[in-house]
Image (cartoon, grey):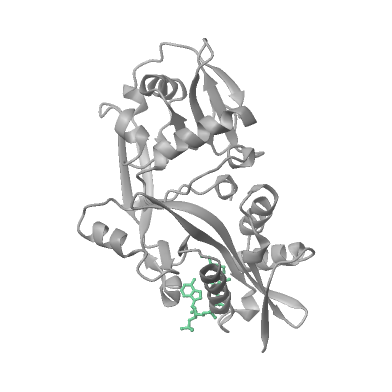
Amino acid sequence: MSIRLRSETSGDEEAIDIVNCRAFGEMDEANLVRLLRTYYPAFDRRYSITAWDDEQLVGHALFTPAQIRLMGKTVKALAVGPVAVLPESQRTGIGGELLRRGHELGKRDGFRLTFLLGHPEYYPRHGYKACFGFARVTIDTENLPPATQKFHRSPVQLADVPWLVERYAAEWAEVDFGWLWGMNLNEWTIPCVSAMLWWTEDGRRAAYTLAKSGGWPQESKWKMMLAEDPMLAREVISTIKPKTLEHHPSGWLAKNVLDPKWGTAEVNASRAAMACELEEGILQPYLQALESNEHLPGFCNWPLPFMLC
Ligand SMILES: CC(C)(COP(=O)(O)OP(=O)(O)OC[C@H]1O[C@@H](n2cnc3c(N)ncnc32)[C@H](O)[C@@H]1OP(=O)(O)O)[C@@H](O)C(=O)NCCC(=O)NCCS
């Protein structure tokens, strides 16, 4: 079988949907590719790699450009996923070829590493190592002090974005593998994600909250909260009473807002959270710091389209 690889071009979208749907046996990954293509500003179809057997699409791998934090610096990286090969074409080397092509393009274009969440038995054979983990804040809602003020809520608007970018950078500056979000409104709000701004009665921004779905106060899956004033952040937490948030112990929220009486933050390394060097040695200082317990494992805050899938 001779397989030809090339970047996605216009007209490939339906075939890419089919490969992802058939490989995973569900629509989540096909939907993720569609959402990234439609809403995510850094989506770049040069890094959406397709594998063809004659006229048939048999495999697809998406690499999304990202800026991530690593040891206090911002590093140009590629996030990998999804990777999909038609069931009848699996185990013939196509998945490996797709990864190799992505790595080649990444190196050529100055990306320094790739990272993903994936099968710990598959990716190490292509240079991936377990590198980061899953972070979580747990809130004992029974012990939260009651809120003492009311807030107005509004959808996120373009005028809010500079504040969000600044607060996000403060939250994630010390978190390795933290994926930085930028100045495009679609990075902060897309349909079917509950992204809201909370305002004080005298018109100050108190917080931005992000939840997977549903309308407040029913949201069950709170993800993230950004704020500037710790006291206002506590008030918003007391209002929404999230059981968990996806924040890291080295972030601004854990350091400035949580009170051990009702909130704790932790991060756990995961074998599924892996990265691969495109520039030799780029991960070395971080891995050494992890090994000597100078650093906690990092945590990646995946952009909004990933939240829905
Ligand atoms: C994972 C996937 C992309 C690999 O593609 P592929 O073309 O079959 O892989 P390759 O031919 O390059 O490599 C095949 C080898 O990887 C192994 N492999 C494939 N999937 C694996 C998995 N989930 N876990 C462990 N090993 C796996 C095979 O056993 C085979 O090993 P062998 O050569 O020792 O027999 C493909 O199996 C697939 O689309 N799976 C369903 C979707 C999926 O899980 N995607 C990855 C999400 S993280």
Which residue appears farthest toward the bottom when viewing the image?
1
The part of the image, by quadrant, that contains residue 234 is top left
Which residue appears farthest toward the left when viewing the image?
292
Decide: is 45 above or below 213.
below
Front residue of 109/267: it is: 109
Q: Residue at x 49, y 12 (%)?
A: 150
Q: Is residue 157 visible?
A: no
Q: Residue at x 51, y 70 (%)?
A: 107
Decide: is 228 above or below 77.
above
Q: Position of residue 257 (x, y in %)?
A: 34, 28
Q: Residue at x 30, y 35 (%)?
A: 264
Q: Position of residue 90 (x, y in %)?
A: 59, 79
Front residue of 177/133: it is: 177
Q: Position of residue 137 (x, y in %)?
A: 36, 38
Q: Position of residue 99 (x, y in %)?
A: 54, 73
Q: Quadrant of the N terminus?
A: bottom right
Decide: is 299 above or below 197.
below
